Image (cartoon, rainbow, N blue to C red):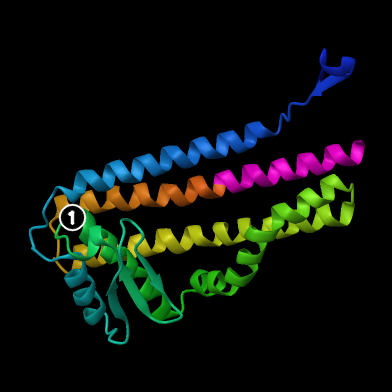
Amino acid sequence: MTQMLGTFGYYPIRYYFDPTLIFAVLGLILSLIASAGVRSTFAKYSRVRSASGLTGAQAAERILHQSGIYDVRIEHIRGNLNDHYDPRSKVLRLSDSTFFSDSVAAVGVAAHECGHALQHQKKYAPLVLRSTLVPAANIGSSLAWPIFLLGLIFSMRPLLTAGIILFGLAVLFQLVTLPVEFNASSRAVKILSNTGMMRDTEVNGVKKVLKAAAMTYVASLAASVLQLIRLLLLAGGRNRD
């Protein structure tokens, strides 16, 4: 905190610097690096055509049926890299860059989403836990900062604590997400290798794409942990004040 004298109205003007902002900046940098990495890697292997000639949608259908899953719909959604599996409605949604493409990257991403469907079929514990945490995580991510800021403004410790707890729920959700994503990628690689849908060199490309994608979740968690540390420091500083 620094103080400088200004000439406006002959009153001193205070300028405040929040040192905890460094945590937010570091988190942003990590997220940007991870995002750039997955875009670059996906773009590289999007230019490599899969020897099987299967599109992402066709590969997903084959993987699901070979796994005995026939009650999961495969839908096309607009956009890129927003592929996901919805366990509530049992729908596997593939984006433009995956659904129609027969690239190594597209088949790899489609196989990864099938990995989530397999987790759902097998009642994979971390996936079940993550689904249970969704409502709490949504509330935490939307209300944590408003409640915490009100606590700072009015110096109300209960609001500060509530904000930290709510944000902690969002961090917990991201933590549980990591094993879910890594496991889905592991299942995808195993399926593509064991079924012969891809050659070894192609599987290596898939591994790189999925690893880059997984790093975005790691970076997101790291950024959230840094934000949580920031909240704790801000709350601690207010207590000292």
Residue at left offset 32%, top offset 45% = 39
- In the displayed structure, does residue 192 sit left or right of residue 29? left
Q: Which residue is mark 1?
A: 104
List x then y, in percent, for residue 123: 46, 79
Residue 114 shows up from this direction: no
As displayed, is residue 97 above or below residue 229?
Answer: below
List x then y, in percent, for residue 27: 56, 39
Residue at left offset 19%, top offset 76% = 62
Which residue is nearer to you in this view: 113 or 197? 113
Which residue is nearer to you in this view: 147 or 51? 147
Which residue is nearer to you in this view: 24 or 155? 155
- In the displayed structure, does residue 170 sit left or right of residue 206? right
Q: How many discs appear?
A: 1
List x then y, in percent, for residue 77: 31, 67
List x then y, in percent, for residue 72: 32, 82
Q: Quadrant of the N terminus?
A: top right
**Residue 20 sits in quarter:** top right
Q: As shown in the figure, which amino acid type bears the numbered disc 1?
A: Val
Q: Which residues are magenta?
A: 222-241
Q: Secondary structure at mark 1?
A: helix
As displayed, is residue 211 above or below residue 107?
Answer: above
